Amino acid sequence: MRRIGRAIRSFRYNRNLIPDLVDALYRTLLLRAPDPVGRTQHINALTKGRLSISDALNSMLGSEEFFHKRGRLLTHHHPERHDHFFMDMSQFGEIPTLVRAMMDMVCTNRIVVDVGVLGVHDSNSYDLMRWFGWRGLLIEANDRLIDRIKHEFGPLDYKIVNVAVSDHEGEATLHIGTNNGVSSLTQAHSAKFGPTTDSISVKVQTLPAILEQENIPLRFDLLSIDIEGEDIKVLNHLVTTSPYRPNWIIVEAGLETPYSPGILPLVPAFDAEYEYVGATIANLIFRNRSLLARLKADGGV
């Protein structure tokens, strides 16, 4: 926040520092560099007086991105206070203990496969391993991120596989985007978020091949996929060519309208086997249609 304060004080006397103010807002409130379009819009609006500093602050503080990064902001600004998954109001931690026990009752094997892991932040696997004792298979194409992932995930129960995932096998080019989160095997996809900054050669495997070589059971609890342009291809390939059927699937889609069968280029077999149960700003969540019946048969529900 000191960075914002300095930029605001300077802004009062020198409008040439408006770009510095915009950069400070993005990096402090959203924990990232500004995207080219957003940066230009904010600079132009502030310069021409269409937007006040207060308006710019409120715009970011009220954004979905700020809301979804609130955990990262807490970790960033108050690391000493961020050692609890729950906002626990129970007497001696009874509710977290209860929730863990209840989750165990409805899990098959507590295995999460995270495709496109990047790191702890924005991870759909870390909390499950950290707080609920799950085992993770973390798959990441960019070899430059592997050491950071190992450092951030620390002593948790996981294995990292450094390979790109698609519906075919071989070699390919990974196009590094404006940030690692938008790197893609398809340059046009990565370039949608700004100029690509680099490229590296990567090995490509199909997801079923990776699951088989890592001895993942045919039914495991969660598959999370976020691989910039390859997500749907990988899901379709998994469903049509293999017996692997995760209980739950989280996949990046970025839909602006509610999900319904046919809205994405998923094969009919996917919607026949999986039902939509929820969405976030970027991802869709699906449940295997046989899961509830299997849990009832096992006495889990």
Image (cartoon, rainbow, N blue to C red):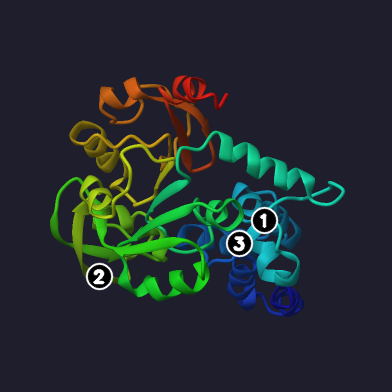
Quarter of the image for residue 31 reads bottom right
Q: What kind of element bears circle 1?
A: helix
Residue 218 % position (x, y): 31, 39
Q: What kind of element bears circle 3?
A: helix
Q: Is residue 50 visible?
A: no
Q: Which residue is mark 1?
A: 70
Residue 198 % position (x, y): 29, 72
Amino acid at dot 2:
Ser
Q: Number of marks in the image? A: 3
Cα gap from disc 1 to disc 3, whole angstroms: 9 Å
Amino acid at dot 1:
Arg
Amino acid at dot 3:
Leu
| Image: 115 above or below 101 | below
- Residue 2 as seen in the image, left or right of residue 151: right
Q: What kind of element bears circle 2?
A: strand
| Image: 19 above or below 74 | below
First in sequence: mark 1 or mark 3? 3
Q: Residue at x 43, y 61 (%)?
A: 158
Quarter of the image for residue 71 reads bottom right
Q: Which residue is mark 2?
A: 199
Cα gap from disc 2 to disc 3, whole angstroms: 26 Å
Residue 271 % position (x, y): 34, 23
Residue toward you, 231 or 217? 217
Using a 10 Å C-alpha cutoff, classify the residue at mark 3 as few (fewer than 14 neighbours), some (14 to 19) or many (20 or more). many
- Residue 144 as seen in the image, left or right of residue 158: left
| Image: 146 above or below 287 | below
Quarter of the image for residue 188 reads bottom left
Q: Residue at x 44, y 47 (%)?
A: 111
Cα gap from disc 1 to disc 2, whole angstroms: 31 Å
* Mark in front: 1 vs 3: 1
Residue toward you, 22 or 258? 258
In the picture, the disc for residue 30 is 3
